[in-house]
Image (cartoon, rainbow, N blue to C red):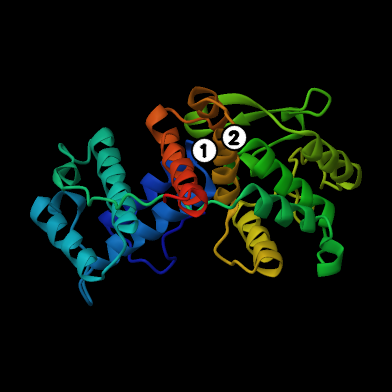
Amino acid sequence: MSDIAPDASPCELAAAIERFLAARKRENVSPHTLRAYGGDLRDFLAYFTPPGAAPPPPAGIGVLELREWLGSLYRQDLEAGTLRRKLAAVRSFFQFLVREGTLSVNAARQLRTPKAPKKLPAVMTAEQTNMLIDRVSDAARLHRPFPLRDLALFELLYGAGLRVSELVALDLADLDLAGRWVRVSGKGRKQRQVPFGGKAADALHRYLAERKPAEGVDAVFLNHRGRRLSDRSVRSIVKFYSTHIAGDSGLHPHSLRHAFATHLLGDGADLRSIQELLGHARLSTTQRYTQVSLEGLMAVYDKAHPKA
């Protein structure tokens, strides 16, 4: 199903975007990524579509036009991360057109990438994380329809440090409950095995005992129809509990992944091991957790040392 608006005018640019999204879908990119591509390219199409007229073909959009488009984004005061994401989507789209022969060069590669501010992720303490997850086990009090599923979901997000896309992609065959391992398909279809703890194993045992899948569905985490839970639904579940238990609507599934890595580092795990557990391609990505850990140490020093 396309992410481009159904009433979009049939034109060369719109058709090219349709082909690009279809190609990404065949490559099994995550639904979240596909929605992001669709939304950003829909905005791109709208910018180049004059009132009452058709947009230019892709070959008619050169570096100058792309710089004007990027300038319009700057004038909207968008965050650097949003600018970078939109530019990445357009670069990927133009590179696709080069590969299929529609364009000879990728003009979008000549645009300068906006610098992203170096922000450290906000991380819950171990006490805050455990309090949140322990109270998820009392989900019946919040009148949730699937409390055992929700608890298993939280335990695995934190206990194995999974991305939300990795969590919803899990099938029953990926779980080794006896050995307490889970096989994860990460970015770039790279697979890794990640251990999880006793609490996560207990929560999974209890949830799987009541799991009621639709016919032929092997997904671990299911929605109310017995089909695979979506990443959007997981975000909604995490937001519900974090809002009603911790009073923080800003927490999301990746918050639990950040907590997983930071708490491991704080308790002495080495960066290489954490890199393997998280499935990071580069150690530099994992190293940002050393900054988070250092900030925590500095806060303890400032509070406790008499000469601070």
Q: What residue type is disc 1 on? A: Asn
- Residues under numbered marks 2 and 1 in contact, where contact means CB atoms less than 8 Å apart: no
- Residue 66: name its quadrant: bottom left
Q: Where is residue 74 in the image (x, y as percent from the top left)?
A: 21, 65
Q: Residue furthest right?
A: 209
Q: Is mark 1 on a helix, strand or loop?
A: loop
Residue 227 in view here: yes
Give the number of callouts. 2
Q: Which residue lies furthest to the front in this view?
A: 306
Q: Which mark is nearer the camera, 2 or 1? A: 2
Q: Position of residue 17 (x, y in %)?
A: 34, 52
> Which residue is disc 1 drawn over?
28
Q: Where is residue 246 in the image (x, y as percent from the top left)?
A: 66, 64
Q: Where is residue 13 in the image (x, y as percent from the top left)?
A: 27, 55
Q: Give the CA distance from mark 2 to mark 1.
A: 31 Å
> Which residue is disc 2 drawn over?
264
Mark before the other along the chain sequence, 2 or 1: 1
